Image: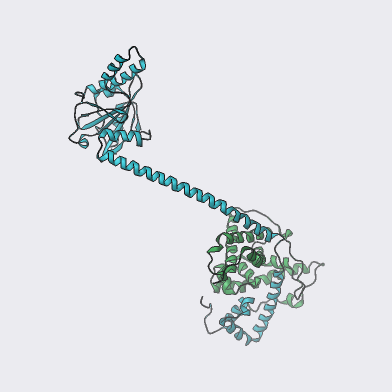
């Protein structure tokens, strides 16, 4: 049994990851921040009910995902248009191998993945949880999670290709590496 | 949780397991994942494809990992949590207050209920109809009628509809008095019906309570009996199958007024009007009442 960390420590440990998860789910900086904050507030009020301190991370992801679903149900009932992608404050470039990918493109591509696949895929790329815990966090059978991750990766690659193709048409942006641009068929699909 | 794929390992199964494996999985592979990796390694093209896929995934994850929360989110979260935390004592205080209040109110209600119930039992078992009626009027009646009507006949019709026919025949004289309404209560398992009469002259109120004669028992007397019951001036009599008690805040004995007038000469019409109440009641009783007790 591990005791759960205090609030400040918890926020320092998980806020960035949770925020990324929320950003991928919502596609909105503001909604992502709200969801992240709401998740920690829920922890402050209900977290003491969690007996096993090793489950804190899963609990946070589960809670955030539930809140997202709740928020989305509310928005379906009360739809509003709040396009704010232009306001996203994302790092400009990833300087290493895949230097042509940038944070905004990845987030937008992840957000474009259809919903059943999006949450598992986000958790996959957050690299925090093994797939067994992803299944627990999202309250979905593990076999379903594996399928959704695999399928989601295929969809993400398509979205990224589309995004990079658009960028290729922009003379201010560097061209795709040949191996990335040519890889249309996915052997794992 | 059971492995999703059964042995023996197949190529699509191995692809699926390996493809879904996260960095955390690969860092500490399960038996199932190890088997899938081993299986895939024996299929060169698939292994190569997965290695490329894995590199892409790592690049995507790295890029995704560079996305940070907006500046100030951490402080915002902690501030909100702090505000919530500070709000808790107030909420707890309010809740404690509410709980305490509810406890006191509950205790009061329970005590009142117990007291009322014990008194009601006393009145019901041991006290006379007059005592029970007095208790009802003083302690339990909320001044709401089951039925309001201006005449006794209207009240009779209401009681007949309610399954209490013949409950109101206190005497012919009462038919001339205007009524306010009736309200029922239980006494010794019987329905007691108090009716409020208003006398015409001074507007005084007389409460007449009717119960089945059998409920009163052998002590029921046909003769008019005048007495005091607590703060009430009371009269009791029987008529037909019913026993009646009249309660009024004013004396029901006309002789009382005669004596008062003698000692208090020349006075006042108010007393004269009070006397009127007594006279009217007495007059109302004349048809049935036989004699004073």
Which quarter of the figure has residue A43?
Answer: bottom right
Question: Does B172 appear above or below A34?
Answer: above
Q: Position of residue A15 (x, y in %)?
A: 66, 64
Residue A36 drawn above or below residue B266:
below
| Quadrant location of the C terminus of chain B in the rendered image | top left
Residue A57 position in % (x across, y down): 60, 68
Q: Place residue B234 in its image quadrant.
A: top left
Residue found at the very far right of the displayed protein: A172
Q: Does residue A169 lie above or below B123 as drawn?
A: below
Front in this rendered view, residue B135 or A21? B135
Task: Please indicate, yes or no, whether residue A21 appears anywhere in the rendered image.
Answer: no
Q: Where B149 falls versus B115 (above or below)? A: above
Q: Is residue A180 left or right of residue B261?
A: right
Q: Where residue B253 sits in the image (x, y, percent)?
A: 26, 22
Q: Is residue B79 visible?
A: yes
What residue is shown at x 76% (from left), y 77% (from top)?
A: A178
Residue found at the far top of this picture? B266
Chain drawn cyan, letter?
A: B
Which chain is represented by green in the image? A
Residue occupying the point 60% across, 54% down: B86
- What residue is shown at x 29% (from left), y 34% (from top)? B133
């Amino acid at each position: 049994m591990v005791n759960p960390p205090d609030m400040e420590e918890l926020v320092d440990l998980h806020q960035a990851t949770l925020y990324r998860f929320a950003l991928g789910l919502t596609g909105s900086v503001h909604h992502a921040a709200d969801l992240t904050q709401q998740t920690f507030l829920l922890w402050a009020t209900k977290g003491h009910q969690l007996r096993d301190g090793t489950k804190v991370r899963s609990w946070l992801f589960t809670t955030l995902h539930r809140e997202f679903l709740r928020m989305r149900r509310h928005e379906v009932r009360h739809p509003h248009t709040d396009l704010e992608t232009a306001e996203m404050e994302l790092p400009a470039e990833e300087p290493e191998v895949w230097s042509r990918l940038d944070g905004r493109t990845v987030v937008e591509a992840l957000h474009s993945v259809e919903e059943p696949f999006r949450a598992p895929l986000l958790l996959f790329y957050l690299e925090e949880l093994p797939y067994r815990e992803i299944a627990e966090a999202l309250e979905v059978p593990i076999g379903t999670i594996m399928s959704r991750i695999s399928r989601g990766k295929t969809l993400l690659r398509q979205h990224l290709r589309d995004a990079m193709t658009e960028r290729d048409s922009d003379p201010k942006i560097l061209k795709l590496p040949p191996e990335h641009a040519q890889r249309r068929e996915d052997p794992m699909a | 949780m059971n492995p999703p794929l059964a042995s023996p390992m197949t190529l699509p199964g191995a692809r699926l397991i390996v493809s879904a494996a996260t960095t955390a999985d690969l860092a500490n592979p399960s038996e199932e994942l190890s088997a899938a990796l081993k299986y895939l390694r024996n299929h060169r093209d698939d292994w190569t494809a997965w290695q490329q896929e894995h590199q892409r995934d790592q690049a995507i994850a790295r890029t995704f990992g560079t996305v940070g929360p907006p500046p100030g989110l951490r402080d915002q979260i902690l501030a909100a949590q702090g505000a919530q935390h500070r709000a808790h004592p107030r909420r707890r205080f309010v809740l404690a207050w509410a709980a305490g209040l509810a406890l006191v109110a509950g205790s009061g209600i329970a005590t009142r209920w117990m007291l009322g119930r014990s008194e009601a039992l006393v009145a019901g078992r041991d006290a006379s109809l007059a005592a029970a009626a007095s208790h009802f009027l003083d302690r339990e009646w909320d001044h709401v009628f089951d039925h309001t009507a201006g005449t006794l006949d209207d009240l009779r019709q209401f009681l007949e509809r309610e399954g209490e026919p013949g409950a109101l025949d206190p005497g012919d004289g009462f038919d001339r008095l205007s009524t306010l309404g009736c309200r029922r209560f239980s006494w010794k398992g019987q329905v007691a019906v108090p009716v409020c009469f208003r006398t015409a002259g001074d507007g005084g109120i007389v409460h007449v309570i009717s119960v089945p004669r059998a409920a009163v028992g052998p002590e029921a007397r046909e003769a008019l009996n005048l007495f005091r019951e607590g703060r009430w001036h009371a009269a009791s009599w029987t008529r037909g199958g019913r026993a009646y008690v009249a309660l009024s805040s004013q004396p029901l004995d006309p002789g009382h007024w005669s004596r008062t007038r003698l000692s208090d000469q020349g006075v006042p019409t108010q007393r004269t009007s009070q006397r009127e109440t007594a006279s009217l009641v007495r007059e109302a009783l004349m048809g049935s009442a036989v004699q004073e007790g």
